Image (cartoon, rainbow, N blue to C red):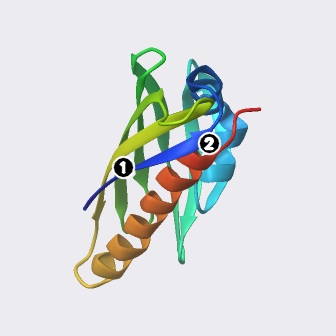
């Protein structure tokens, strides 16, 4: 599934950019995130819960155009399902002074047994949308 949207948040683009690279902001913004364990240079082991399913996987934050564009990806595995998330984020000056425009394009794929994966896909899709909106609305420290 795919979700796209754009929000305007208070704060300068540089401050919002820094907030999006803060592990505490990421962890607090991801629904069901139990832990982010740093591995190094913007890579984390993520432990997530979606409904009754727990996933462990690699979460990475990559700067594709430093200061204006980044990609967050998650490749997770659960007992019976897989979870793949890709989130592209674009940051720019907002319409008013002191604001930032944050646009995102989120894609999610859940794999697993038929029937169970349909319900999980809907739950995870909502979680991705909530994550993108929550991160995009986070205020810089």
Q: Quadrant of residue 73?
A: top left
Tell me the crowding category of disc 2: few under 14, some 14 to 19, or many 20 or more residues within 10 angstroms, Cα based. many
> How packed is label 1: few (under 14 Cα within 10 Å), some, or many (20 or more)?
many
Give the position of the C terminus as an image quadrant. Answer: top right
User: Where's residue 42, x and y in %?
Assistant: 55, 24
Q: Residue furthest bottom?
A: 115
**In the displayed structure, would residue 137 be above or below residue 24?**
below
- Left or right of 135? Residue 101 is left
Rendered view: 77 above or below 102: below
The reply to whether residue 86 is in sight is: no
Taking depth in this image into account, of 129 and 103 the one nearest to the observer is 103
Horizontal and vertical percent for residue 71?
39, 32
Q: Could one spot residue 81 in this view of the protein?
A: yes
In this view, the residue in front, 79 or 53, is 53
Residue farthest top in this picture: 66
Residue 4's disc is none
Left or right relative to 139: residue 107: left
Which one is nearer the viewer's eye here, 63 or 50? 63
- Cα separation, mark 2 vs mark 1, equals 14 Å
* Residue located at (57% from left, 57% from top): 48
Residue 34 image position (x, y, % from top left): 68, 56
Residue at horizontal 53 percent and vertical 34 percent from the top: 100
- Find disc 1 in the rendering and name its residue: 85
Q: Measuring 58% from the left and 43% from the top, which residue is drawn there?
A: 9
x%, y% of residue 41?
Answer: 56, 18
Q: Nearer the viewer, mark 2 or mark 1?
A: 2
Mark 2 or mark 1, which has the lower sequence index?
A: 2
Describe the element under mark 1 as helix, strand or loop: strand
Give the residue displayed 25% in from the left and 62% down from the top: 1
* Total numbered circles: 2
Q: Would you name the residue on which mark 2 appears?
A: 26
């Amino acid at each position: 599934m795919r979700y796209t949207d754009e929000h305007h948040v208070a704060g300068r683009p540089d401050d919002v950019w820094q907030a999006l690279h803060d592990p505490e902001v990421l962890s607090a913004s991801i629904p069901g995130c139990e832990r982010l364990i740093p591995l190094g240079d913007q890579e984390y082991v993520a432990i997530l819960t979606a409904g009754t399913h727990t996933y462990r996987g690699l979460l990475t934050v990559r700067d594709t155009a430093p200061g204006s564009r980044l990609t967050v990806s998650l490749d997770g595995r659960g007992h019976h399902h897989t979870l793949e998330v890709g989130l592209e984020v674009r940051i720019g000056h907002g319409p008013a002074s002191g604001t930032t425009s944050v646009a995102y394009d989120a894609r999610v794929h859940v794999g697993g047994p038929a029937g169970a994966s349909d319900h999980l896909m809907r739950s995870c899709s909502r979680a991705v949308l909530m994550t993108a909106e929550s991160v995009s609305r986070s205020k810089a420290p």
